[in-house]
Each structure stands twice: as structure tokens, then as C-alpha cells.
Image (cartoon, grey):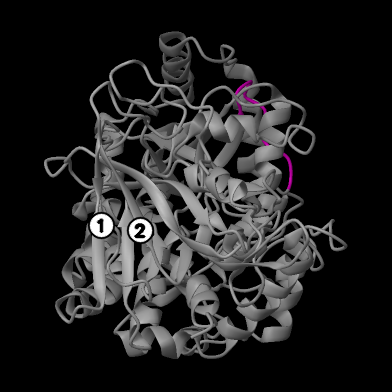
Amino acid sequence: MNGNSHSHTNGNGHTNGNGAAPHTSGHSASVAPDSTDPDAVLIVGGGLAGLVAAYEITKAGRKVVIIEQENEACLGGQAFWSLGGIFLIDSAEQRRCGISDSLELAKRDWYASAGWDRLDDEDVWAKRWADAYLDFAAGDKRKYLRDLGVGFTPAVGWAERGGGVASGHGNSVPRFHLTWGTGPELVRVFREPLLVAHKQGLVEFRYRHQVDAIVTDSQGQVTGVTGSVLESSDEVERGAPSSRFVVGQFALSGRAVVVTSGGIGGNVDLVKATWPKERFSGRVPEHFVVGVPAHVDGRMIKISEAAGARTVNKDRMWHYTEGLKNWNPIWPKHGIRVIPGPSSVWIDAKGKRLPPPCYPGTDTLSTLKHICKTGYDHTWFILNKSIAQKELALSGSEQNPDVTGKSYLGALSRIIWGPEPVKNFQRYGEDWVTANNLEELVEGMNGIVERDQRGPKLVLEQIQKEMTDRDLQIEHPYTKDTQVMVIRNAWSYKGELRCVKPHKILDPKFGPLIAIRMNLITRKTLGGIQTNLDSQVLGHDGEPIPGLYAAGEVAGFGGGVEKRDGARESSEDVTDDHVQISLLPQ
């Protein structure tokens, strides 16, 4: 069977750009030999989920074949580019920061954030996975990572600070543990033992092999995969788009197939096609920047469906609202997410301040819904040099060379002088404006609007009113402004390294002023292939499909939720996948 039977080519063997499987050109294609070990486990996808799966399986002495459509440089997938945020509950790092956390509190936060509304159907396993994951995060997770050699920075970050009520969305306490070494470090601790296992004959890598179908026998048992061999792309750098020209076919058999191919965030057409219009204000945004490489294309979701897999919660996804167009892109429409502190004023495309709880770092999906409601796909941050230097960070391993490179001197320099990657965006980025006064700032913002022909012209008087109203709330230690309350709350947390002392943004001594256009940026898939707690893929009858497993983002991180807990980056699939893969039947 073939999950892409309706795909088309452009006549030269390349895909038509919609993520469908490629076909060969007119000459006949060679067929790669079958796997010589029918007892091997076939892992489709060499991202972090696949590496964790291979690591856990080889620890049991079994052979694995990792099937990856990209070249060897891309081993580790999108996790390599991630910041490496790890969600832990009641950790040693939290306690050192004076944070009192508990499984009960984390579970209440998770349940309040999840938005489960299909517990009699699609959310049954999602809730079970949440419980299993929370138990792991409060239990063995930190030890599991520490035993692998993973360390964390001392300060615990506070992502998704919440929607304003104790029973609502968000983290009640900081839980974002930043990996010392970011995403590449998480990739390394699994890649290195797999390279050793490769020398021992337990791991086989099949790069530039793109799976087109999952093979099932007459009894319904999954027995292997077939697919296309793509032309060599050794010269292509990690993350950059590669050719889809087919030079051959392959067929591999094994005792089980584990799908770990990632989500849909690199396929903007598929993101738009599955956009939950009913929940997000009735329209599909037109403009996105893209937060993951193009190979995060969602192909294996449809291919798994063709093999009988049930997919659930495909309308649930997690896209950020603070995206910058990368001035130095690696993949098409490459976007970088701003990780903000709490102090910037956030206005919509018309210059109106966003309402509660749509403040920087508080409630991503509520903000996304509100932005969609405005009819435009961008917003603006207004801040000043003091806020930018202390509060702005950029997501991604390459945007944090100090932490990625494990440089204590670099980390100290960032604290004193501000992050150099942020300064580079201020110098070269097309979404930034710097000015000495508000009139010049608005003029520069309108220059961006006119240049790109996106959005309405901003009115100085409207923005002046919003900024003055906000600044007048700073004069006293008490306030009616909810965002100022959020700022003072953050300022009181001793582990908060990215919050400037509350001050008037328009005060010239904290200048110059800065405006940043924030674009929607694609990121995570929250729905996907439904699995049970053994990571077995379930069919439409709710029963496991023999020999077929899935883990990581392609499985909705275990079933899909409307709102993930927030203090988690793509690289943290490592922990989700450990829960899933460690339960694979031996």
C-alpha cells in the first residue's frame, strides 16, 4: 500500500511542493536490498524521538535500522535547533531558586491548560499520557537525564505564566530547565552511544531513504516499509532544504516499525489545511514565518493512516506569536521566536494594546486567538534599550552560542551587555525599528508597513495614548494594570534573570525606543497518531496494530492537548519519548 497514491511530480522527479512522496523520472529505478535481519526494529525518522527509541531498544541488545530522508548532518532533526527546555517538577534546581513545586500543583496546571473536550473519544489516551508524563517529570526524569550527562543552568525559567486565575491555563511556578548545551547537547547524549552501537553492529543508518508505505501482511501484522532512495545531498548543510529527486527504491523488513518522523510545522500548506478555524476566530492566517526545517513535513502521518492508524486531534497545534524573520536564514521562511520578559507593551496591527491575558510570556494560545480575531497576522512590541538588553532572548541553539557552547564567560557577557544575537537582529533584521522618540518610532513602523504592504498605517496618537496610560501606572507600588502586576510579580522572583526593574518605557534615560514586528511562527503539532501507553499505534477500532509503534511529535507527544504546559521546547521530546519507548515490549 502507498500513503501517497495521489501525489504528482513536475516531470523531473521532484515533488510538487506539497510534501507528497516523490516519483522517479522516466528511467527505471534500482531497488536497495532488504534488511538482512528480520528481527531488527525499523525506526522511521532520525530526529531526537528516533534517537531515543534506538537508544532504548539497543540497550536491550536488539538491532535497529534508522531510516532518515535527510543526510547524516541532520541526525537529531529539529531538536538540534531547539533551546533545550526541560519540564521538571520539584527539581533540585527549583528548590535552589526557592520554588516550592509538587506533582499535585503541576497536575492541576496541566489539566487546566489541556482543554480536553473529547474525553469520551480522542482525548482518552491523551489524558492517560499526561498522567504518565507528569509522574515521570516528578520522578525519574531528572535522574534519567543526569545519568546521560545532561546538566542545567542554575536559573529556572518561567514560561507560560498563565491567564490570570489559579484554575486557568499556565504554570503556577517556574518549571523551564534550560539544558547546558541546549538542543545539540540533548542530541549528543543519545547520538554518541548509538555511534558506538553502530560499530558493534546493533545500529544501521539508512540516510536519504524516504518511506512511502508501511507494509502489512495478510494477518494485519506490520512487517516493514518501502520507499524511495533520494539522490545524495552530502553537500547540504544541516537544516537546509534538500533535493527530492529519486534515484532508486528500497524495501526493508523487520519485527516492528516505530514511526518517529515529527510533526507538520515545516509544511505551511498543511498547517493552513488543518488550521482550527472554529476555535481560532474563523480565519486561516495568510502570513507565517517557519520555526522548523522544511523536512518537518508531516508525510508519515498520512502514510500511517494508510496503514490503518487512527489519527486524533489534528486540529490542535501550538504556534507562537512572537516570530522574527531570520536575517540569516537556514531554511525557507526561517523564523526565530522571541522569548520575551514581561515588560514590553504589546499592540495589535492597528496600534491597540492587547487585552489580558495577552501579555508577553503568559498565554500563547489566547494571544494567538486574539490576533486571528483582529484580521491581521502580525503585532508589535514597543520597548526600550534597557528592556531589550535585559529581557529579550531568542529561541534556538544557534541564537544562544554562550549556553550552546557551554561558555561561562559568554553567559556572563550576556548578563552584563545583553545577547549579541539580539543585537544582530536589531542591526540586520527587517522587523526592527529604533528611534529616539515615539514620533520617529511610529514613522519607522509605518515604513515597514508600506514596504511590505501588510497591515494598516499606525496612528501616533493611538500609540501615544497606550504608552502614556501604561507608564502612569508605574509611579506607585500598586496599580490597576494587570501587566504591571505581572511585571512586579516577576521582579519578586529571585531566579528571574530576565526582568528589568519596572520603569516608564518612554523615559529617555532608558532609551532609545525600539519597536519589533512580531509574526506568527509555526512550531508544534499537538495531534497525531493515537497510541496506548505501550506506544502501540491504535487502529480505528481502538485495538493496537501489531508491529506498529509511534512516539514523539508525530504521535502528538502522546495523544495531543489543546495547550501544552508551555515550559517545554521541541528538544524535550527526549523525555516524552523515554516514557513511550521505555515501555516498548521487549
Left/right placement of residue 472 relative to residue 438 reads right
In the image, 585 versus 192, the foreground residue is 585
Q: Tag on residue 206?
A: 1
> Who's the residue at 72% across and 37% down the image?
276
Residues in magenta, as a range: 348-356
Checking the image for residue 4, the label placed there is none
Given residues 249 and 581, the one toward you in this image is 249
In this rendering, the answer to whether 106 lies above or below 400 is: below
Please determine whether, in this image, residue 416 is positioned above or below residue 276. Answer: below
Point 57% across, 35% down: residue: 271
Residue in front for this viewpoint, 268 or 448:
268
Q: Quickly name the residue at label 2.
A: 252
Report the Cα–Cα distance between label 2 and label 1: 10 Å
Name the residue type under label 2: Leu
Q: Is residue 444 above or below residue 525?
A: above
Residue plotted at (51% across, 49% down) = 263
Label 2: which secondary element: strand
- Please tell me whether mark 1 sits on a helix, a strand or a loop: strand
Is most of the magenta stretch helix, strand or loop? loop
- List x then y, in percent, for residue 380: 53, 31
Residue 234 in the image, given as x and y percentages of width and height: 13, 44
As for residue 94 lying within the magenta part, the answer is no
> Can you tell which quarter of the image residue 377 is in?
top right
Q: Which class describes the residues within 10 Å of circle 1: few (<14), some (14-19), or many (20+)?
A: some
> Residue 451 at x, y = what percent?
40, 10
Q: In the displayed image of the protein, which residue is found farthest to the front?
A: 218
Residue under the image location 66 percent in, 32 percent down = 371
